[in-house]
Image (cartoon, rainbow, N blue to C red):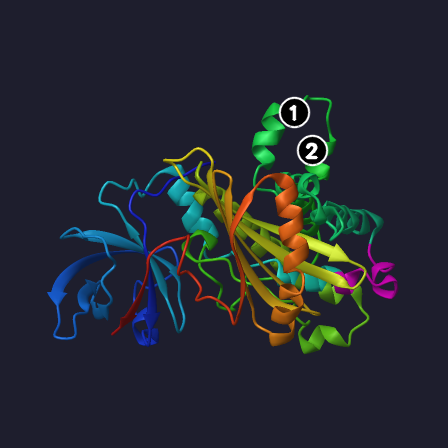
Amino acid sequence: MIIQPTSVAALTWLGAAAGASSEGWRIGSVLSARPLGVNEQGLLVLQVGAITVETEAPGTKLPPQFQVRVLSVGAQPQLEILGADSQLDTTVHQALRARLPQQNGYAPLLATVGALSQWSVAKQLPPYLRSALALLEHSMSTPRELTTGEGLRQAVNRSGLFLEAQLAHAPASDANTAHDDVKGAMLRLVAILKGQATLGESSADEVDPPLLYRGVVPQGRLPLPPDLLSTNDATEFLPRLYTDVQAALARLEVAQLQANPNHWIVEIPVQDDEGADVLQLSLKHEEDAQQDWTMGFSLDLPSLGPIVGELQLRGLRLSVRLWAQLRDTVDLLEAQFDHVRKRLDATGLFLDQLTCQFGLPQAGNSMSAVFLKATV
């Protein structure tokens, strides 16, 4: 399923928690909005529902009347500006509204699956549930696989983003397409968990907005909650496992619904002997130039900390910018620059820029959408 929003921006709210809890401010709700003018500080004044806010100018002209959809609530609610010609009742938008309140990242699911993989706990589970968990782990990539171009391509293909397209073109006798795919493995796990006696409820935790509306953001490992950290009873994990896999599946389906032919966000679970992490990729093709691509990535490894990168390919010219939150990681990456230059020279590419900066870039400031800071 592919959607290309007509006029999309995102509002990053500061101090609007009171407004977000007002009537109608629920994830998926659509509110009327209109610009009221510019104040003395040069901030744009908007009325959203019954609330008046101040925001930085988006850089694009807003219509006299428009609608916004609530993407997330909490201390920093986020809204999607909808174009005047958006068909809000289409199947795609209905699917988005259903999944936005449920979606969350892979980190909670990976923590739960990692705990259940311990033999002392796993042996308590029914064989068919152990098989489904093993299939999910099998669908994850390994660090070694991602070190080659072909391995990365295969990891993207089985990330779940393209499952339906692959099934549509696969021979009827080929049963391995869904088995090797992350989404296929999660769908099987959800189907099995629905038959368990105790199911989890939707998480009350605040979740991130859809990935297309922000830049790549490193996602670190999450610890288990205290009540599960000390238990040896596998059945106590099942409600959380059901909630986590539903949330990860909803997040993946939101990414599918919002993908367009020129921009994809891909999340790849990566597992080794020490645990599982999340590699996030943003692939953007410049419409006016056939060979111009921008790839963003993020990764948060226990040994290196959060890392963000952006590669811009313009024909045969390549620019690489890296960011690392830890100073030691910056030094470690810079020590590899000579090796990187030699490898790139062998490919025939011209390296215009190769840098690594200390600290992380501001989320959402580059490839995804216009982010506005607003106050009530």
Q: What element carries label 1?
A: loop
**Label 2 near label 1: C-beta < 8 Å?**
yes
Q: Mark 1 points at which residue?
A: 170
Task: Specify start and end residues of the magenta stretch as a single range.
Answer: 114-125
Residue 170 higher or lower than 162, as above or below: above
Residue 116 falls within the magenta-colored stretch = yes
The residue carrying mark 2 is: 177
Residue 301, position as x, y percentages in the image: 67, 65
Q: How many marks?
A: 2
- Which numbered disc flags the more N-terminal residue, 1 or 2? 1
Relative to 361, 344 lies left or right: right
Vertical placement of residue 57 versus 348, above or below: below
Relative to residue 42, is residue 359 drawn left or right?
right
Q: Which residue is nearer to you in this view: 11 or 102?
A: 11
- Circle 1 residues within 10 Å: few <14, some 14–19, many ≥20: few
The amino acid type found where label 2 is placed reads Thr
Q: In this view, does 47 lie to the left or right of 368?
A: left
* Mark 2 residue crowding within 10 angstroms, few (<14) / some (14–19) / many (20+): some
At mark 2, the secondary structure is helix
- Residue 210, given in percent of the width and then of the height, sits at 45, 55
Q: Residue at x 36, y 54 (%)?
A: 369
Q: Quadrant of residue 164?
A: top right
